Image: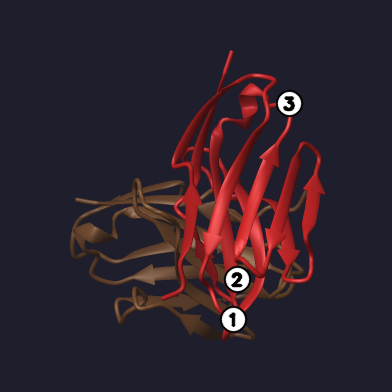
Amino acid sequence: KNQVEQSPQSLIILEGKNCTLQCNYTVSPFSNLRWYKQDTGRGPVSLTIMTFSENTKSNGRYTATLDADTKQSSLHITASQLSDSASYICVVTFTGGGNKLTFGTGTQLKVEL
Amino acid sequence: EPEVTQTPSHQVTQMGQEVILRCVPISNHLYFYWYRQILGQKVEFLVSFYNNEISEKSEIFDDQFSVERPDGSNFTLKIRSTKLEDSAMYFCASSPGSNYGYTFGSGTRLTVV
């Protein structure tokens, strides 16, 4: 069964600090991997998208890495801000009809003063 | 920046009633999707729609669900005879192509009582 597992489940950091979120997936065949940010009660917002041939992708303070051999990805957030408090979701596209997204369970990040 | 618009933002309905959730995808996008998120759980794929027909659907998308693109701008999800377990946040999404970023709407929170 195609699965996407994330760790940690939740994380609290101080404003200004960096953090790294992890994602492991078993989705196969694999097309691309995305990281989304989801604020409570809102729709997911795309941060990065990487194909299997890409190792890293940056979007401002967000940097995603991908190791397609080990089926692992990470999202690094630098100089965290209070507005970064949200759920960060790893999403893998299963190559097939419709190219549906398989969502991970997310990491709930809280940034505090 | 173009947005995916969903209406209503909240819907309360009695068990057994029919509901229609509405979405206006981004105008030049070709792929349309419905996802749902039960409170506290991960986002789940329901259905993808391309070229005026369903391209893929999940096990969740049974005979009580249907989708329609009644005109050039709207994309609807109909749930016939709602059940308590249909209570969830329903997200519409669209993308210009299968390997492009998806844009999600803000969701419709459906509560079945």
For the view shown, which residue lies furthest in the top direction? A113
Which chain's residue wears label 3?
Answer: A
* Separation of residues labelled 2 and 3 (CA atoms): 29 Å
Residue at coordinates 72% horizontally, 71% vertically from top-left?
A52
The location of residue B90, given as percent across then percent down, is 44, 57
Name the N-terminal-most of marks 1 and 2: 1
Label 1: which residue?
A29
Asked if labels 1 and 3 share a chain, the reply is yes
- Between label 2 and label 3, give the one nearer the viewer: 3
The chain displayed brown equals B
Left or right: A99 with respect to B96? left
User: Do the numbered discs 1 and 3 sit on residues whose CB atoms are within 8 Å?
Assistant: no
* Separation of residues labelled 1 and 2 (CA atoms): 9 Å
Name the N-terminal-most of marks 1 and 3: 1
Left or right: B97 with respect to B54? right
Left or right: B16 with respect to B80? left
Which chain's residue wears label 1?
Answer: A
Label 3: which residue?
A79
Tell which of B33 and A10 is nearer to you: A10
User: Do the numbered discs 2 and 3 sit on residues whose CB atoms are within 8 Å?
Assistant: no
Residue at coordinates 61% horizontally, 50% vertically from top-left?
A36
Q: How would you rate the neighbour count of disc 2 (Cα within 10 Å): few for under 14, some for 14-19, many for 20 or more? A: many
* Quadrant position of residue A113: top right
* Quadrant position of residue B94: bottom right
Question: What mark, if any, has residue A93 been given in the picture?
Answer: 2
- Between label 1 and label 2, give the one nearer the viewer: 1
Asked if labels 1 and 2 share a chain, the reply is yes
Residue at coordinates 61% horizontally, 60% vertically from top-left?
A72
Label 3: state its secondary structure.
loop
Name the N-terminal-most of marks 2 and 3: 3
Which amino acid type corresponds to the residue marked 2 in the rendered image?
Thr
* Separation of residues labelled 1 and 3 (CA atoms): 35 Å
